[in-house]
Image (cartoon, helix red, strand yellow):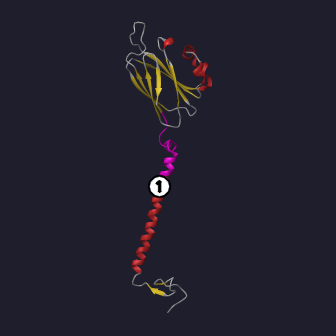
Amino acid sequence: MLSNQPSLFKIQLINTGKYMNLSNRNRTWNRNRNFNLNFNRFNRIIFMCLALLTVTSISGCSMMNFFVTPSTTLNFVASKNLNPDMETRPSPVVVKVFELASRGPIETADFFSLYSDYEQILGPELLNKEELVFNPGQQLTYTRELNKNTRFIAVLVAYQDIENSRWRDVIAVDPKSYDDFSVYLEKLSVFIRD
């Protein structure tokens, strides 16, 4: 008895045009079908996980910014023979850290103008300033959330022998990343390294 409605237990064999009864193999067929559906569902889950992983790795630090505020760390290391006085004894030194929108004004100004009148010299390029004092041999880790417009960090060191010293250094930064720099305060010079 064949009707116009398809039977659950009969399928048409494509190559012969005949019907085959599947009543004995119904469970196996359903089991395979469910397995295929589960396997497809598993593939979809794997695909979604890989897609999510790809998107987060492409976006990099910007995704991390939703959870942790970006910051820049300066690891200061002062030399044991820092800032020698007239008798070559090591001495404490004043260090100014500037956040800048551009490096132009700090590159052209002289030490005494920058040290005493930095606000007027740097003008709108100055976004933030911090003053620290270091003793010879001292180490300090300084972490700061940068202004969103900060593009450079400048370090100015007030050595006693300013004429024979390298008293400033400037480095480019990204306010949306997690930067870590070392600032070496040597006998008569300052260096910033990443």
At x 45% / y 69%, what residue is drawn? 37
Residue 65, percent from left and from top: 50, 41
Answer with the quarter of the image where residue 113 lies. top right
158 or 16, nearer to the observer: 16
Q: Residue furthest top?
A: 87
At x 47% / y 14%, what residue is drawn? 159
Residue 33, percent from left and from top: 44, 74
Mark 1, residue position: 50
Residue 73, percent from left and from top: 45, 31
Tell me which segment is drawn in magenta: 53-71
As drawn, 141 above or below 34: above
As drawn, 40 above or below 28: above
At x 56% / y 17%, what residue is drawn? 114
130 or 175, nearer to the observer: 175
At x 45% / y 59%, what residue is drawn? 46
Q: Residue furthest bottom?
A: 1
118 or 164, nearer to the observer: 164
Determine whether the residue tagged by mark 1 lies in a helix, strand or loop: helix
Q: In the rendered structure, which amino acid carries the disc numbered 1?
A: Leu
Looking at the rendered structure, the number of numbered marks drawn on it comes to 1
Answer with the quarter of the image where residue 83 lies. top left
Residue 43, percent from left and from top: 46, 63
Task: Determine crowd level at label 1: few under 14, some 14-19, many 20+ residues with C-alpha closer than 10 A.
Answer: few
Give yes or no for residue 57 being in the magenta stretch.
Answer: yes
